[in-house]
Amino acid sequence: MNVEFINPFLASLLNVISTMASMQLTPGKPQVKTHNLAKGDISGLMGMVGPKTKGSLSITFEQGLILEIMDKMLGEKPDFLNEDVSDLVGEITNMVTGGAKNLLSDKGYDFDMATPAVVVGKNHSISHKAKGKKILMPFSHAAGNAYIEICFDEE
């Protein structure tokens, strides 16, 4: 998969979390993912289709991290993953994808974004519809980890 295509999503996540929550995530080492099991507790999944490409992105958070982000962004910290946390994950997924879309349009990639779906629960699965490799990028923070998965059809 083209690094030129992945980096805008990673940069956008770092930007959204630092701007909106005043938190810094530390990027880990990218890897190819060969299964559908999510590594965290709640995921936002966004499909993207354009003239040159089709794929999807997911952002998965461990409970401790997303609750800390919610506290920093909204001043609320529930004790568990609830509907408000799900709404926040959907909104973060929207912001990250929108930011990446702007960066990618400068490189000639254009795509339409779907409404994000949010999946909650330990050991939930994430089904990417594209046929390409799934790239998993971990991010760490003292409050927990986040993971971006990107999967696009090969051009």
Image (cartoon, grey):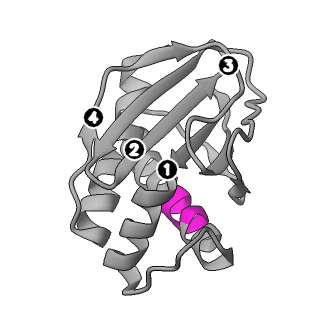
| Residue numbers of the magenta segment | 89-94
Query: Measured along the vertical axis of the image, is residue 134 above or below residue 51?
Result: above
Q: Secondary structure at mark 3?
A: loop
Task: Tell me the CA gap for discs 2 and 3.
Answer: 27 Å
Residue pointed to by mark 2: 145
Q: Quadrant of residue 4?
A: top left
Pointer 4: residues within 10 angstroms few (<14), some, or many (20+)?
A: some
Task: Tell me the CA gap for discs 4 and 1.
Answer: 15 Å
Residue drawn at x 46%, y 62% is 66
Residue pointed to by mark 1: 62
Q: Which tag is nearer the camera, tag 2 or tag 3? A: 2
Kindly report the secondary structure that dominates the magenta region of the rendered protein: helix
Task: Tell me the CA gap for discs 3 and 1.
Answer: 28 Å
Task: Tell me the CA gap for discs 3 and 4.
Answer: 24 Å
Tell me, yes or no, whether the two marked residues, 1 and 2, touch with CB atoms within 8 Å: yes
Task: Tell me the CA gap for discs 4 and 2.
Answer: 10 Å
Query: Measured along the vertical axis of the image, is residue 104 above or below residue 101?
Result: above
Q: Secondary structure at mark 1?
A: loop
Residue drawn at x 34%, y 38% is 139
> Where is the C terminus found, in terms of image quarters?
top right
Q: Which tag is nearer the camera, tag 4 or tag 1? A: 1
Q: Secondary structure at mark 2?
A: strand
Residue pointed to by mark 4: 27
In the rendering, at what x and y percent does residue 59 appear? 53, 46
Task: Tell me the CA gap for discs 1 and 2.
Answer: 6 Å
Mark found first going from the N terminus, 1 or 2: 1
In the rendering, at what x and y percent does residue 22 appear? 21, 68
Residue pointed to by mark 3: 153
Mark found first going from the N terminus, 4 or 2: 4
Badge 2 amino acid: Asn
Mark found first going from the N terminus, 3 or 4: 4
